[in-house]
Image: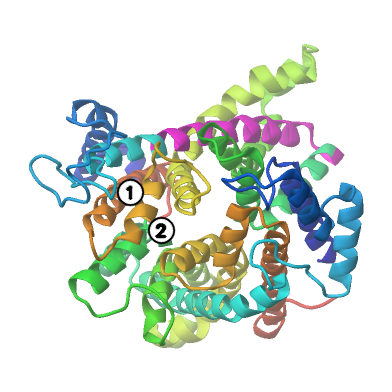
Amino acid sequence: MTRESQIGFFGPVYVKVTCGLLLLVLAATIVGPHVAAWEYDAIHWEAIGVPPSSEHWFGTDNVGRDLFTRTMMGGRISLLIAVLATTVSFCIGLPWGAVSGYVGGTTDQVMMRIVDGMYAVPYVLIVIVLVVMLGRDIYLLFIAIGAVSWLDVSRIVRGQALVLKAAPFVASARAMGLPEYRIVVRHVVPNVLGSAIVFATLMIPSVIISESFISFLGLGVQEPMTSLGVLIADGSKNIYASPWQLAFPTGLLTVLLLLMTVLGERLRRMVTGAERSLV
Amino acid sequence: MLTTIWVVLTLTFFLLRVAPGGPFDSERAVSPAVEKNLLAAYDLDDPLLHQYGSYLWGLVRGDLGPSYKQKDFTVAELLFHGLPISLLIGGIALTIAVTVGLFLGATMARYRNQKLDAALEGFVTCGLALPPLVAAPLLVLLFSLVLRWLPAGGLESPLHLVLPVISLCIPYIAAFARLSRSSCLEALNQPFATAAQAKGVNNTRLLWHHVVPSALVPVLSFVGPAAATLLAGSMVVEVFFSIPGIGHYFVQGALDRDYTLVLGAVLVYTTSILLLNFLIDLVFLRIDPRIQLN
């Protein structure tokens, strides 16, 4: 094992700092909308498009809604959709990969060719078409994203299942005469779970990007509900008159993605081991 | 290749039609008689399978149908107008990403586990966290609003291309840099690299004449997948900077339920990705003597 895995995940100072900052941002998105003096969808006619002040910390948007509350709310929705979409992709990818890897043979061939085929299709096109089909509903958005991002999960899980198939305890389970589905459910899946969960956390930033992207194009979260993509789209329409409308949501998204990517990299390096000490 | 295109088109065609709503829905409902005439004018009242058949037949003859929303334009006209712009931006961004990424990755491999490597690794991690949707607003805020160096949107001069291209290629530079680093390191570990070193080849020559050429294949095989995800970025960039490329039409079409426009854009996208992959395979034949046609 590498030196890094002996120190533990929280070893270096930068990891502790990043974790602390991320917790702070998460807390802000959860608590923020409640402690703020304004509702996220309340319209204030007397304060339309005002710059940041002590009253409205991030200023207001073009219909006079408090931007601090909206940005925090947007962050919360983006995170929520990301977690749910990752769960969906997990629910599809895990059984798919486990069955494909364990059963093997023709079944494996067919299941993996389907995955390969879906890789060849530009996934954005499918997400957008799915979103158009399912309607612009926040509850369907994460299903659409999850439905296309399970491919990576299924590949990882399949690889693990192939290894587990040869493990002695699986052989003994088979010798005991357990039915196949029971071996998959009780012996293969629980053992794959660990690495699959690590991989799923690595996926969250990219799912946040997908959600923001779709909402930015106007196909995702709809008014008066908001997400970071919606806020960036709104802000980009008024960059000269009120740049703060673009700056704050972009800032939050940047901070979120940077923190999560740094932690994800750390996690990835610990799991895959010796990337840095290759030579 | 044709099969993939056909599968994607068929899937898109039926998924779009399952959706409730149509291109002629609007805030103010049109009278049933008018709607009926509209649907009849575009053959949208035929049975679905019949419509599918006539769409495919039109496709074979090179007819992508009329746009339902952009009156007086056929889908082909719109796409031919948008394609060169999208190709230009995407092409430049991809070229920059591969060359800069390869250069950075090779440098990181040369100074592996030293300060320069660690510093560049930090930049790469940041780059991966900056998709076009984040990079574009940040760059516009900095270069258009604070510094006032570059225009924030539109497409009137080459200068207007700078910000879109940069915001599109940042994460790909990072991805290519990381990939190049690891494949250069792999090449460095092989006997031929040791032999060259033993022969007294200096480090720079070893890197660019021996290591990089053999590391090129894994790097180039990532160009195809990169281009497929670059599509999403190019849509963001085109919408954000108000550039009339294919991405712009695709998004507009999806918002308007302009079936033919969406299908046309999907067709162009899928075809260009597949063509790119084909071209890369051809390039492999040129650059790597180990790969041969059977």
Number of the label disc, if any, that sits on residue B133: 2
| Residue nearer the viewer, A85 or B154 | B154
Residue A87 visible to the viewer: yes
Judged left or right of residue A94, residue A22 is: left
Quadrant for residue A95, please give it. Answer: top right
Q: Are marks 2 and 1 in contact (CB under 8 Å)?
A: yes
Q: CA distance from mark 2 to mark 1?
A: 9 Å
| Residue nearer the viewer, B194 or A207 | A207
Residue A208: x and y in percent read 44, 44
Residue B275: x and y in percent read 71, 74
Please, which residue is most extreme toward the left here?
Answer: A54
What is the basis of the colouring in this image? rainbow
Residue highlighted by disc 1: A253
Query: Which residue lies at the image location 72% right of the left edge and 36% below the top edge?
Result: A101
Query: Which residue lies at the image location 73% right of the left edge and 16% below the top edge?
Result: A182
Quadrant in which the C terminus of chain A appears = bottom left
Residue B47: x and y in percent read 90, 47
Q: Are marks 2 and 1 on the same chain?
A: no
| Residue nearer the viewer, B8 or A8 | B8
Q: Residues within 10 Å of mark 2 (few under 14, many from 20)?
A: many
Tag 2, which chain?
B
Determine the main secondary structure of the stretch shown in magenta.
Answer: helix
Quadrant for residue B273, please give it. Answer: bottom right
> Is B149 placed above or below B69 here?
below
**Residue stretch rendered in magenta on the structure:** A79-106
> Is B183 placed above or below A53 here?
below
Quadrant in which the N terminus of chain A appears = top left
Give the residue type that dot 1 points to: Leu
Tag 1, which chain?
A
Q: Is B2 colored magenta in this rendering?
A: no
